[in-house]
């Protein structure tokens, strides 16, 4: 177990942080990961699902084939905090810790390749495009599960706000489903002095934003965590014209498949009724993106036991609450058993914000 090169892994993580790459463009990252695995005499396959990299470590005796997965992509965010390893790519940063996840999996590769006295095979899956671009399905479609005979899969994600190095996992739904809302309102438009001669898409859009909030507040079972958020509202170009078009975008997330169906039905119903009430036309595109991330109970319990062996029972929550973030690791768990766990990144501070924040940094 002493094969772990902590200083080298920290340097690797910071190098990846300084050179972030967006979904399906992780060419430099994939090349570095592949080179690290080659140096450890690990079988390497590249270009799986686009830029994905897979390493295979065979134990000294027969046993199951288990995969460990890390995501590689960064986000289109401009980093705010001046650090030695600050992003050198304008408008792109590792604001979710995938640089750290890659370094963690390389560390696992160091340990497992140094002492192969275990039963079975470990498959290291370095996945592209987790951030909304569905790299997991791309790897699955490219045959990663069948090609390498993967029987179980495990993933882990840092979570700011949990004490550094603590672990959390749960049987069942760990992360939410994730769907996109794209709404276009149209009407003739006209002069601001005569709104009665137009259909006012701004008033209609404002009413729609408010009405959509009643889905979670008043229409769903309050025991099911869910959220509907409108995150973009674009309309108009000057102060004396009621525009002919308003474009709204948002997301819907929940921890229950039935509630997911209900949210889609209610979004459609509310968009239609609000548009009719305001005399405008509506075009709704409701796109289902990621399903809920549902852990196999036995795999989740195994993950908790292993974490407790590392840090002690008191630092592992084996039945944590699910959260409304989403993950395309869910697609792996639809195919084979596995579990997705959290590791604490420490407190949220001005120097290390929450994930998807310009101040975020992975806790080395």
Image: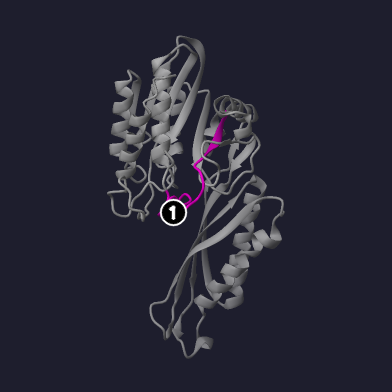
Task: Give the residues in magenta.
Answer: 337-360
Q: Residues within 10 Å of mark 1 (few under 14, many from 20)?
A: some
Does 84 appear in magenta?
Answer: no
User: What residue do we see at 29% from left, 27% from top?
Assistant: 35
Q: Quadrant of residue 173?
A: top right
User: What residue do we see at 33% from left, 40% from top?
Assistant: 14
Please say if 203 is above or below 67.
below
Circle 1 — which element?
Answer: loop
Q: Quadrant of residue 56?
A: top left
Does 340 appear in magenta?
Answer: yes
Q: Is residue 265 left or right of residue 6?
A: right
Residue extending furthest toward the bottom = 193
Q: Label 1 belongs to which residue?
A: 357
Residue 226, x across and y down, in percent: 63, 53
User: What residue do we see at 31% from left, 37% from top?
Assistant: 29
Placement of the C terminus among the 4 image quadrants = top left
Magenta stretch, main secondary structure class: loop
Residue 215, x across and y down, in percent: 65, 61
Image colouring: one colour
Residue 316 visible in the picture: no
Residue 187, x across and y down, in percent: 48, 76
User: What residue do we see at 44% from left, 41% from top?
Assistant: 363
Residue 45, x across and y down, in percent: 34, 25
Q: Which of the two residues, 255 or 19, is positioned nearer the viewer here?
A: 19
Placement of the N terminus among the 4 image quadrants = top left
Residue 178 visible in the picture: yes
Q: Which of the two residues, 42 or 54, is positioned nearer the viewer here?
A: 42
Q: Which of the two residues, 262 or 151, is positioned nearer the viewer here?
A: 151
Please say if 188 is above or below 60.
below
């Amino acid at each position: 177990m002493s094969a772990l090169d902590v200083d080298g892994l920290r340097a690797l993580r910071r190098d990846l942080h300084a050179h972030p790459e967006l979904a399906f463009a992780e060419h430099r990252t994939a090349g570095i990961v592949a080179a690290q695995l080659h140096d450890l005499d690990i079988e390497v396959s590249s270009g799986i699902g686009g830029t994905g990299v897979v390493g295979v470590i065979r134990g000294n005796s027969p046993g199951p084939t288990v995969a460990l997965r890390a995501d590689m992509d960064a986000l289109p965010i401009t980093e705010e905090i001046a650090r030695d390893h600050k992003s050198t790519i304008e408008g792109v940063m590792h604001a979710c810790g995938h640089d750290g996840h890659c370094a963690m999996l390389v560390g696992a590769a160091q340990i497992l390749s140094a002492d192969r006295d275990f039963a079975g095979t470990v498959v290291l899956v370095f996945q592209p495009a987790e951030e909304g671009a569905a790299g997991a399905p791309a790897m699955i479609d490219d045959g990663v599960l069948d090609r390498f005979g993967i029987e179980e899969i495990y993933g882990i994600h840092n979570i700011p706000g949990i004490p550094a190095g603590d672990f959390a996992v749960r049987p069942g739904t760990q992360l939410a489903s994730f769907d996109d809302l794209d709404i276009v309102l149209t009407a003739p438009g006209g002069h601001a002095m005569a709104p009665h001669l137009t259909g006012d898409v701004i008033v209609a859009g404002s009413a729609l934003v408010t009405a959509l909030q009643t889905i979670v507040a008043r229409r769903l079972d309050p025991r099911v965590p869910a959220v509907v958020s409108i995150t973009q509202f674009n309309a108009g170009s000057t102060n004396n014209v009621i525009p002919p078009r308003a474009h709204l975008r948002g997301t819907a997330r929940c921890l229950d498949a039935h509630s997911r169906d209900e949210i889609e039905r209610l979004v459609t119903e509310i968009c239609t009724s609000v548009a009719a009430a305001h005399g405008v036309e509506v075009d709704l595109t409701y796109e289902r993106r990621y399903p809920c991330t549902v852990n196999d109970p036995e795999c989740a319990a195994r993950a908790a036991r292993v974490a407790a062996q590392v840090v002690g029972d008191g630092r592992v929550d084996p039945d944590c609450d699910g959260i409304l973030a989403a993950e395309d690791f869910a697609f792996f768990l639809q195919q084979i058993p596995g579990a997705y766990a959290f590791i604490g990144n420490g407190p949220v501070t001005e120097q290390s914000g929450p994930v998807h924040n310009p101040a975020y940094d992975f806790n080395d």
